[in-house]
């Protein structure tokens, strides 16, 4: 699974071409779960989110989109 930052510093959509079986848009709890499940099932998956990947890997980010 690859993560792709959907933001562009120029304000335009990124122009890089990525070959994959599935594009999952949104890296929330559902998007990440679906991307992982599809990847484990053998699909080539790209996960696109508007946030930078570094934000999710920062130790100060608790990862919760909601609390139960």
Image (tube, grey):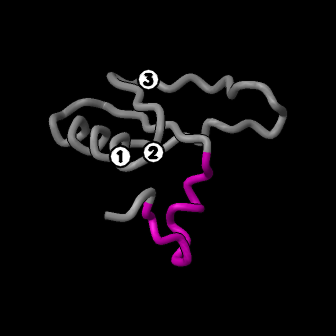
Q: Residue at x 33, y 43 (%)?
A: 30
Category of crowding for the residue at label 2, using alpha-carbon neighbours closer than 10 angstroms: few (below 14), some (14–19), many (at least 20) = many
Q: Secondary structure at mark 3?
A: loop
User: At numbered mark 2, what does the secondary structure look like: helix, strand or loop?
Assistant: loop
Mark 3 Cα within 10 Å, few/some/many (few <14, many 20+)?
A: few
The quarter of the picture where the C terminus appears is bottom left
Magenta segment range?
A: 51-64
- Which of pointers 1 and 3 indicates the residue nearer the eye? 1
Residue 34 found in image quarter: top left
Q: Are marks 3 and 2 in contact (CB under 8 Å)?
A: no
CA separation in Å, label 3 and label 2: 19 Å
Residue in view at x 36 percent, y 49 percent: 29
Q: Pointer 2 and pointer 1: residues touching (CB < 8 Å)?
A: yes
Residue 9 forms part of the magenta stretch: no
Picture mark count: 3
Question: Is 58 one of the magenta-colored residues?
Answer: yes
Q: Is residue 25 above or below residue 66?
A: above
Where does the image place residue 67, in percent across and percent down from the top left? 38, 64
Residue 32: numbered disc? 1
Residue drawn where x is 15% and y is 35% of the image: 41
Circle 2 is placed at which residue position? 27
Quickly name the residue at label 3: 19
The residue positioned farthest toward the right in the image shown: 10
């Amino acid at each position: 699974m690859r993560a792709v930052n959907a933001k562009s510093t120029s304000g335009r959509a990124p122009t890089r071409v990525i070959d994959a079986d599935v594009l999952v848009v949104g890296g929330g709890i559902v998007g990440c779960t679906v991307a992982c499940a599809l990847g484990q099932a053998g699909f080539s998956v790209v996960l696109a989110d508007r946030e930078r990947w570094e934000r999710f890997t920062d130790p100060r980010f608790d990862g919760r989109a909601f609390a139960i």
